[in-house]
Image: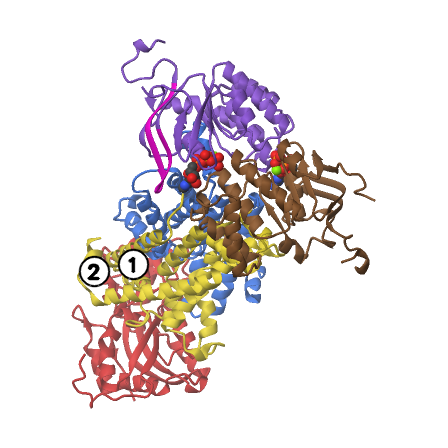
Chain colours: A purple, B brown, C red, D blue, E yellow
Amino acid sequence: MTADARPAGTARDGEAFFVKSLSFRYERRVAVRCEGLRIRIGEAVAFIGPNGSGKTTMLKLLNGLIGPFDGSIAFLGRPISHNPDLRRRSVYVHQHPVLFAGTVRDNLDYALRLKRIPKSDADRRVEEATERFGLGGLLKREAGRLSGGETQRVAVARAVAAGADVLLLDEPTSSMDAESEIAVRALLLELRRSGSTLLFSAHDEGLVKELSDRIVRFDDGRATSDNQGDLE
Amino acid sequence: MTADARPAGTARDGEAFFVKSLSFRYERRVAVRCEGLRIRIGEAVAFIGPNGSGKTTMLKLLNGLIGPFDGSIAFLGRPISHNPDLRRRSVYVHQHPVLFAGTVRDNLDYALRLKRIPKSDADRRVEEATERFGLGGLLKREAGRLSGGETQRVAVARAVAAGADVLLLDEPTSSMDAESEIAVRALLLELRRSGSTLLFSAHDEGLVKELSDRIVRFDDGRATSDNQGDLE
Amino acid sequence: GKETAPATRPTPANPRVRLATTTSTENSGLLSYILPFFTEDTGYTVDVVAVGTGAALKLGENADADVLLVHARAQEDAFMAAGHGADRRDVMYNDFIVIGPKSDPAGLKGSASSAVAFERIATVAAPFVSRGDKSGTHVKELDVWKAAKITPAGAWYKEAGQGMEQVIIMADGLQGYALADRGTWIAVKDKTSLAICYEGDAGLFNPYGVITVAPSKNPAINAEGAKAFSSWLTSARGQGLIASYKLGGQTLFFPNYKP
Amino acid sequence: MTEAIALLAGGDRETWWTVATSLRFSVFSTLFAILPGVPLGATLFLGRFKGKRVAVALVNAVMAVPTVVVGLFVYSFISRSGPLGALGLLYGPGGVILGQAVLAFPLVAAMSYTGLQKLDPRYSETLLTLGAGPWRRMTAIIKEGRYVIVQSVLAAFGRVTGEVGVSMMLGGNIRWYTRTMTTTIALDASKGEFERALSLGLVLLAIALAVNFLSHLAVRDDR
Amino acid sequence: MTEAIALLAGGDRETWWTVATSLRFSVFSTLFAILPGVPLGATLFLGRFKGKRVAVALVNAVMAVPTVVVGLFVYSFISRSGPLGALGLLYGPGGVILGQAVLAFPLVAAMSYTGLQKLDPRYSETLLTLGAGPWRRMTAIIKEGRYVIVQSVLAAFGRVTGEVGVSMMLGGNIRWYTRTMTTTIALDASKGEFERALSLGLVLLAIALAVNFLSHLAVRDDR
Ligand SMILES: Nc1ncnc2c1ncn2[C@@H]1O[C@H](COP(=O)(O)OP(=O)(O)OP(=O)(O)O)[C@@H](O)[C@H]1O
Ligand SMILES: Nc1ncnc2c1ncn2[C@@H]1O[C@H](COP(=O)(O)OP(=O)(O)OP(=O)(O)O)[C@@H](O)[C@H]1O
Ligand SMILES: [Mg+2]
Ligand SMILES: [Mg+2]
């Protein structure tokens, strides 16, 4: 698709998010402020900054989980409110995720059903995720009773299996053991190569260096990109 | 105090924890099993192992937060059930901690009051903790509304300020930013030098190397110490 | 009101009297009408507790009422015999009537007696709502069935177990018959589409009695107040006021105290 | 107590029949109260619409309406001259069940709403981000909060089992037809048979206790 | 509706007096129900003792006991021939308030318990590890769960405001003394004055609504 073929005001070719003059407050305190930010489809962007600087808040804003805010956020060229693409193509994974009642397998199946993945396809995807994330031993376990790291692994697996191509991951490996972390990193690299858009927050420098094309720095709520020209 | 002066069956001189033939299950699955483990006062011990291997469960067991279990756990020479020292001298900090309603300062004050720290002493301690953990900007904030890393920092500060000399910390820096992590590491080192006993779980090798005298490895619920002679 | 004549109103030591009575005396408006006069004359205020007949007697038995105004002669006599009461007097009477749909589908009008009227209801199996609560009215109804040599049973016979007013309202809802006391009927009739279908049988006499509870039962009983109420109600003044109470132009209760 | 046991063990046929009728009415009315009540509670919890506050307050406040008023309200619909008069529900089991369901439904909604309130907000966020529509979110949140929902259903069951106003008003307390435990108790109390009324109250308590225990077997407290 | 407004706006002194009396009784009885009820609920939540299950089921089941039975139960204590007869509470405000408190207290306990149930278990673990004794744990958990506690208090207030049995039985529905909104309504309904009864029911609903709104101002929903 070419940009020219689209009506005015829509996304430039390959633009995933376009944020302008954003400002969001919890009650009185401003938690996130961003003059402008453009994230292209297929980019892998790391959100870094000290605790409480607004990374989680920004990720939730980009996924339309919190609001209202001042300014504008567009996803694939359209405002995120009432944007059907948002739920179809992007998914957010909490810093400390929760799983639903039922087994781990139920959780995966459920997410696939929500994303309307056909049954035939679904089984294959669950199998794939199980292998990639080493969930073999966990599939039949009660999801609410897993350890911190296990929960995080399943939550990321659930998001990936659901097949969203824009992933917003909040400190995705913070509770994981070394082995899982390596596996998840490898997987995210692969997703990036295959064209998915990745936005993730992290305190772990290794993850940031290995995985990101670009860094957005957060400082006391102010988000600024290393990349110039985000705002024309 | 000398060991000889004590009745038989009590702790050896300077023994913080003594675990024997421990086995604990959540419903049917065994989550922790440990033939024997001895942790001396003043030791810094790291619990490492993959996700779901039992680190959190063991820390909670050692702090008497879950039960019942088979086998025995002694704290300062006495069984942990009905052991008044347990609550007076040790404290556990959750992997993903929660804070109480009220401000951050209220949380610190409250913990000090629970540990019966006299008022005069309390203010000094809160000041000290504020400085050490860089809580200056957070003291007056509503505790329930902090970010993940901020919450973890306050929770560790709360435990340290409460003046327990046996600290059980569950992945204490997993959500922290680099700066806080360095500060907390330094602080824990200092506590160790001043004679506190530290037990912590971690996936971060740096933390383990820098801080621990000894490692207890967890594998699928089985806890084994690097140190031989834990069991005579 | 203003204390216009403080000298004329007596001030008893214990000015609150507790009267347990059936709902019919309260809901017909009689008590609201006469009690202010009683207070005026004697200085006593009356706390009216309106309950079922059985409950009123039970309250007397437990000494939770000082005086009773009820209509269930057999139970009243048993109450006296058991020594729960100090003094029982006839106060007034009215009568029971059979009410039913204006169209009177069982054709009660012109029945020779209440027993005959009941027989007609049973014959056509017209809905009949019974109090079913061992109240004076219920006891009377059972007497009539006995006189008619009928054991009422079947879907048409609704043993409701509720107060008089509710039974009248139910009879209206079911377009059926019921035995009612005239006082309650007059008070409620405008809310229904029913009419009196049979009246006038001497057997349908409904006497009320006033009973002072035996003071020996409990020191908290206001014996003076109870006595004052009983005496006043049976005095010429009390009897006269009862006779003068009218609702919709009709007299509800007829005084009948005989010293 | 002994009298209560005697009443039941003695095999008094009428007492047993009344117990059974009470249960039948309560079970059906609770069922009919759940059907709209639980979804309404979940919707109030999930929804972000104007007037939500008012709706919540209203649903909470309805508890303060005496059962006899609820009875009257329903009466005005099912009385012969009311819009539903033709159904002939008044003074029959249908009337009692309808009235009790109307009584219990806001209770179920209010208690479900309040209970779900304490559910971790991450659950609804996760549902949202995974693309669950309103219906899926509702069913999923009911599943997550099933313990709380069961509690609200139990409360509703208790409420309808123990209420008098509606049963009296719409059922008429007709023997062998619409007489329930509670209307029997009210009748006994009005007859001055206080001991019997108290005994039947204990029987009612025992039934409620049994139902509570059974429900615990169904959905275990997962703390 | 119009009649309800007319009743109040028209300044009918007796109606206003009855409204005030109802409120007075409800406020005091709710207060007396909270004092033991909330701590009991919190204790049930925190405690790990034998018979806890039974206690919880019992407290839940009490809701199914008709108010008239609660009234009779309390009556047996405060009747002149009962153990507390000397206090002279029967057929006075004291009797109604006592009875309503007895009625509402298990409700407060049950609802507090259920509500706290959903509180994150880490709260009580944190309290334990910081060395809080039973008393501190109880007060702290009540503070953490204040939103839920307020809900249970509101429910109790609604319940006592709307109940008839206890008020009738222990207050005697004595005019200018113990007559409340609900006993007036019951009386009106029994006299066939359905419109007036319904109107007063609406007034009661309005009061409950107002109380609910006020409570929301006091403790905001923090979601
Ligand atoms: N409440 C619970 N009920 C049942 N099983 C549980 C519960 N909590 C933990 N488990 C299981 O017990 C085992 C040990 O869990 P634990 O939380 O101690 O692991 P961990 O070593 O702390 O893992 P992590 O590094 O992910 O935090 C895991 O298999 C976990 O799934
Ligand atoms: N629900 C809330 N209500 C009020 N303030 C909040 C809330 N959640 C977060 N905040 C505040 O907003 C700011 C940004 O928080 P956020 O969670 O986005 O930080 P973060 O960068 O993700 O931090 P961390 O690295 O610790 O996860 C912080 O100051 C935090 O205290
Ligand atoms: Mg964060
Ligand atoms: Mg853990």
Chain ID of residue with mark 1: C
Q: Nearer the viewer, residue C179 or E169?
A: E169
Q: Is residue A24 magenta?
A: yes
Picture residue at 61% right of the left edge, 47% below the top: B92
Query: Mark 2 vs ligand 2: CB under 8 Å?
Result: no
Are discs 1 and 2 less than 8 Å apart at CB? no
Q: Amino acid at mark 1?
A: Ile
Residue furthest out toward the bottom: C7
Q: How many angstroms separate mark 1 from mark 2 (CA)?
A: 25 Å
Task: Count neighbours of disc 1 (C-alpha within 10 A) and say few if under 14, some if 14 to 19, many if 20 or more.
Answer: many
**Residue at disc 2, secondary structure:** helix
Would you say residue A135 is visible in this rendering?
no
Residue D94, given in percent of the width and then of the height, sits at 38, 47
Q: Which residue is mark 2?
A: E7
**Image quarter (top left, top right, bottom left or bottom right) of the C terminus of chain E:** top left
Magenta segment, prevailing SS (helix, strand or loop): strand
Q: Nearer the viewer, residue D181 or C188?
A: D181
Q: Nearer the viewer, mark 1 or mark 2?
A: 2
C40 versus A93 height, above or below: below
Q: Which residue is mark 1?
A: C169
Residue C237 shown left or right of residue A88 in the figure: left
Q: Is residue D180 magenta?
A: no
Q: Which residues are magenta?
A: A16-34
Residue C242, given in percent of the width and then of the height, sits at 23, 78
Task: Count neighbours of disc 2 (C-alpha within 10 A) and say few if under 14, some if 14 to 19, many if 20 or more.
Answer: some
Residue C36 shown left or right of residue D193 in the figure: left
Residue B184 shown left or right of residue B33 in the figure: left
Question: Whereabouts is ligand 4, in terms of quadrant?
Answer: top right
